[in-house]
Amino acid sequence: MNTPNEQLFNRAQLVIPGGVNSPVRAFRSVGGTPRFFKKGKGPRFWDAEGREYIDYVCSWGPLLHGHAHPDIVNAVCRVAQDGMSFGAPTELEIDLAERIIGLVPSIEMVRLTSSGTEATMSAIRLARGFTGRTNIIKFDGCYHGHGDALLVKAGSGALTLGQPDSKGIPADLASHTLVLPYNDAHALKECFQRYGEEIAAIIVEPIAGNMNMVLPQREFLQACRELTQEYGAVLIFDEVMTGFRVALGGAQSIYGIQPDLTTLGKVIGGGMPLAAFGGRRDIMEHLAPLGPVYQAGTLSGNPVAVTAGLINLELASEPGLFERLGDMTRAVMDGITEIGTRYGFALSSCSVGGMFGLHFQKECPSNLEQVMKADIALFKRFFHGMLKEGIYMAPSAYEAGFVSSVHGTQELHETLEAAEKVFCELAG
Ligand SMILES: *Cc1c(COP(=O)(O)O)cnc(C)c1O
């Protein structure tokens, strides 16, 4: 007898490639049947079989305040009743732009899009249009959405499926993307010395979260800033994941480095399709209709999505929220790491704000090569053990995890109790 999740997965596979609308959801790298979800509330959600889980994926980051936060749901319902989309400007878009600009000092103007992929793709086009140059630099294991130029040695699902370079991307297009190791200021400097005059932009995750979580070395981010300045290239911080997630001002506020452009997504939509790119006024003014770089979107700035984002950011601005969230996230990581280590497993972890990396190796990795040394077999067993205990972690060893502001001591307690049981079984 098939379980309800299995029945749904079988049905889905007949009509949707792999049964999913985004690859990592398919459980390919961990095996087993993906859970189909019906309902979420706060830090928990329920699958098609009515099984309850504590959620450490949080829709891959957006749910900073958990599932179905009443303030967000109420506002979205209210706005939707007055129309779902106009294809013409609304005041709400100005409100959100002003709020983003108020929170992220490096952003002077901002354009809204519907996905992070569009935001990064548009930022790259803008940087190329602004500089009149073609080549861009990205780093091994960083993921910037699935735009052609950026799906080269990419992280996240591409990495999970062992396809960091996708088929279907013309080689001459990919050849304009130079790929360097993360956290290697020396390699970056050498690259600029050779090709500096041809480089339009560096795009970087200022805290990497798509090859599991990898912290940047300050000198590395500083080198990104100084070299782009020296050679007249544009520095793009891809904060689609880290924006309003690691701190209210994003990773750039933690490291004190101002990029020229920033891409945002995930948390700014509060669970709705919404993303953005913004930055220096003189660069942003190159966008159509002011300038010659074209960029557009039928649903860009959609009032319902913008409302979800506005409330998500308003709730994020509550004083002390990020300290509390950071403490909770660290407690979850410290607890799991302590338990696993006590049972003799090589484990390490890191976290900033509500984002974490649990690494199945002794030391936290600082680049993709080190990330790849994780004990994947152990991770899979841990993942399935926790899932059975009602703890939902990302179904890939190459993804960061997330805690919401409504995960409390009860969730912490249940999570560590589950970890104790799972590691004990794995050790036995
Ligand atoms: C998720 C993510 C993207 C892509 O955003 P989508 O909304 O999935 O298109 C881009 N960059 C980073 C750093 C991300 O984490």
Image (tube, rainbow, N blue to C red):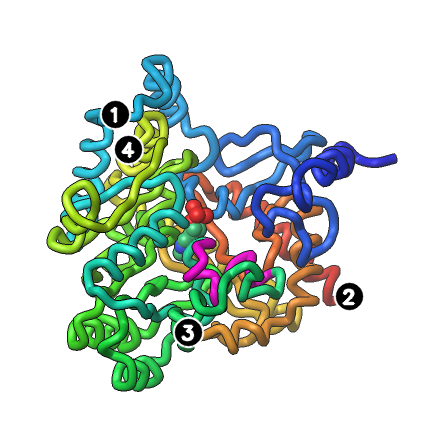
Boundaries of the magenta span: 146-160
CA gap between label 2 and label 3 equals 43 Å
Marks 4 and 3 sit apart, C-alpha to C-alpha, by 35 Å
Q: In which quarter of the image is the N terminus?
A: top right
Rendered image: mark on residue 428? 2
Q: In the rendered image of this protein, does residue 187 appear above or below residue 174?
A: below
The residues bearing labels 2 and 4 have C-alpha atoms spaced at a distance of 49 Å
Per the image, label 1 sits on a secondary structure element best described as loop
Q: In which quarter of the image is residue 147?
A: bottom left
Q: Position of residue 300 (x, y in %)?
A: 32, 35
Which residue is denoted by mark 1 in the rendering? 88
Name the residue located 18 percent from the left edge and 76 percent from the top edge.
Answer: 231
Residue type, mark 1 in image: Ala
Left or right relative to 151: residue 226:
left
Residue situated furthest top in the rendering: 81
Identity of the residue furthest to the right in this view: 1
As helix, strand or loop, the secondary structure at mark 4 comes to helix
Depth check, front residue: 201 or 172: 172
What amino acid is labelled 3 in the image?
Val
Q: How crowded is mark 4: few (under 14 residues within 10 Å), some or many (20 or more)?
A: many
Which amino acid type corresponds to the residue marked 2 in the rendered image? Gly
Q: Which is nearer the N-term, disc 1 or disc 4?
A: 1
| Residue ID for mark 3 | 179
Q: Is residue 236 left or right of residue 356?
A: left
In the picture provided, is 357 more to the left or to the right than 374? Answer: left
Above or below, comparing residue 233 to residue 41 in the picture: below
